[in-house]
Amino acid sequence: MAIVLWPGDISYVDRIQSLLAAAVGNPSEQSVMALLNGTYRESGARLDMIFDGPELVGVVGSLRIHPGLAEILHMAVDAPYRGKGWGRMAIQHLRTDVYPDVWLMAETDRDAVGFYAQLGFHVTSLGEKYPGRERFQCVLKP
């Protein structure tokens, strides 16, 4: 496994786009491209690519909000690779290599809340932020 910071070029843009589509609600090609161009090229957020050999199998996007807190903005692992430790390794990468001494925070839905809880994140319900979709805040101490 290798995790590489997306350099901002277009060499993996189609694959990144398909992975990010799984991590955003109601994705369109335009909204995912706006995410790549706005959030990950211009705002200071980082997008790390997760590789199994030459195969891009996942992405994790994050942003340091202030010196003591970083937010996981998006996380997606391709379906055939889920449940095999890739997401756990991505969180470990953020914790040890990128944000070693800060709180990590993520907002997620019911589908992924168990993943964060298993990794030691404290989970709090945010209620139904979107019609029919309960959201959760997940926080991991340094």
Image (cartoon, rainbow, N blue to C red):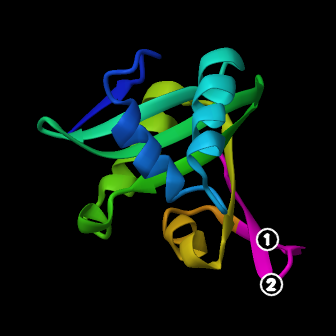
Give neighbour class at mark 2: few <14, some 14-19, many 20+ (Cα, 10 Å). Answer: few
| Count of numbered circles in the view | 2
Residue for badge 2: 132
Disc number lying in front (2 or 1): 2
Q: Is residue 142 visible?
A: no
Assign the C terminus to one quadrant of the image: top right
Residue 20 vertical placement versus 131 (above, below): above
Please state which of residues 101 and 11 is positioned toward the viewer in this rendering: 11
The answer to whether 30 appears left or right of 55 in the picture is right
Residue at image coords 42%, 50%: 19
Q: CA distance from mark 2 to mark 1?
A: 17 Å
Q: Which residues are magenta?
A: 123-142
Residue for badge 1: 124
- Does label 2 or label 1 sit earlier along the sequence? 1
Dominant secondary structure of the magenta stretch? strand
Residue at image coords 76%, 23%: 67
Q: Position of residue 46 (x, y in %)?
A: 56, 26
